[in-house]
């Protein structure tokens, strides 16, 4: 089993920032990078600030056979708060590809989520220990449109449900939300992305 590293959340954005000169594309990538780190650190309130998202963002989340539509900061805030309360904000790409354009980002990820067994059981998954932690892996495609000021308009997320795999984690491999924040805090505060230099 490939156990994901939460620090992979910025691996592909940082690679693109190192080679991207277009100012709008860089602004979009920087917004996305900060958004991802804040989400994984449980600091969702900072995602919904006026410099990060539009006044009326819209999320479309299609996962595990369900389609969830969230409109506005209040609904989206409740969604994030519920994730953090259930300790479900430990996830990230094992591998991914990101394309940036003037309209926003297109992403395909092989994703890992560390999830409590009881949550998976409530979702109808056949697990043998509700007190254990499991890694859910699956392929995800997502599209992130941005406005003229490089603020997020929304997230449109689509899961390949046939790719879902659930495996019990060795306790030593479990990444807790607290450990995630510890690992990501230096990446959130640092800004080591000089503009790419044209050859």
Image (tube, rainbow, N blue to C red):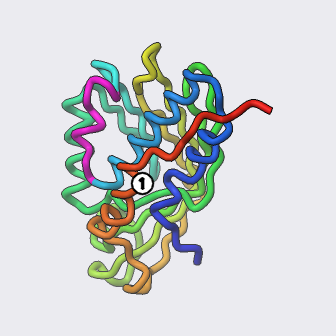
Q: Position of residue 33 (x, y in %)?
A: 46, 42
Q: Which residues are magenta?
A: 42-52
**In the image, is residue 116 above or below residue 48?**
below
Q: Position of residue 2 (x, y in %)?
A: 58, 74
Q: Quadrant of the C terminus?
A: top right
- Which sits in the foreground, 175 or 57? 175
* Magenta residue check for 51: yes
Residue 74's image quarter?
A: top left
In the picture of the structure, the residue carrying the numbered disc 1 is 187
**Residue at horizontal 60%, vertical 20%?**
102
Q: Position of residue 6 (x, y in %)?
A: 45, 62
**In the image, is residue 39 above or below residue 29?**
below
Left or right? Give the position of 36 relative to 75.
right
**In the image, is residue 90 above or below residue 22?**
below
Q: Quadrant of the N terminus?
A: bottom right
Q: How many marks?
A: 1
Left or right? Give the position of 128 relative to 92.
left
User: Secondary structure of the magenta portion, mostly?
Assistant: loop
Residue 173's image quarter?
A: bottom left
């Amino acid at each position: 089993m490939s156990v994901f590293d939460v620090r992979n959340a910025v691996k592909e954005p940082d690679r693109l920032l190192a080679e991207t000169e277009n100012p709008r594309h860089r602004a979009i990538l920087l917004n996305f990078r900060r958004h991802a780190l804040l989400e994984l650190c449980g600091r969702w309130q900072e995602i919904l600030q006026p410099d990060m998202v539009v006044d009326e963002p819209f999320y479309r989340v299609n996962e595990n056979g369900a389609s969830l539509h969230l409109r506005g900061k209040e609904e989206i805030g409740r969604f994030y708060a519920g994730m953090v309360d259930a300790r479900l904000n430990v996830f990230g790409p094992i591998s991914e590809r990101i394309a940036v354009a003037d309209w926003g980002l297109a992403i395909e990820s092989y994703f890992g989520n560390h999830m409590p067994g009881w949550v998976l059981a409530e979702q109808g998954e056949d697990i043998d220990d509700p007190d254990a932690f499991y890694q859910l892996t699956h392929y995800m495609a997502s599209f992130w449109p941005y406005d003229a000021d490089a603020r997020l308009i929304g997230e449109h997320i689509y899961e390949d449900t046939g790719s879902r795999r659930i495996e019990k984690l060795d306790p030593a491999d479990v990444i807790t939300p607290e450990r995630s924040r510890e690992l990501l805090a230096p990446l959130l505060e640092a800004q080591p992305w000089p503009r790419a230099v044209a050859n």
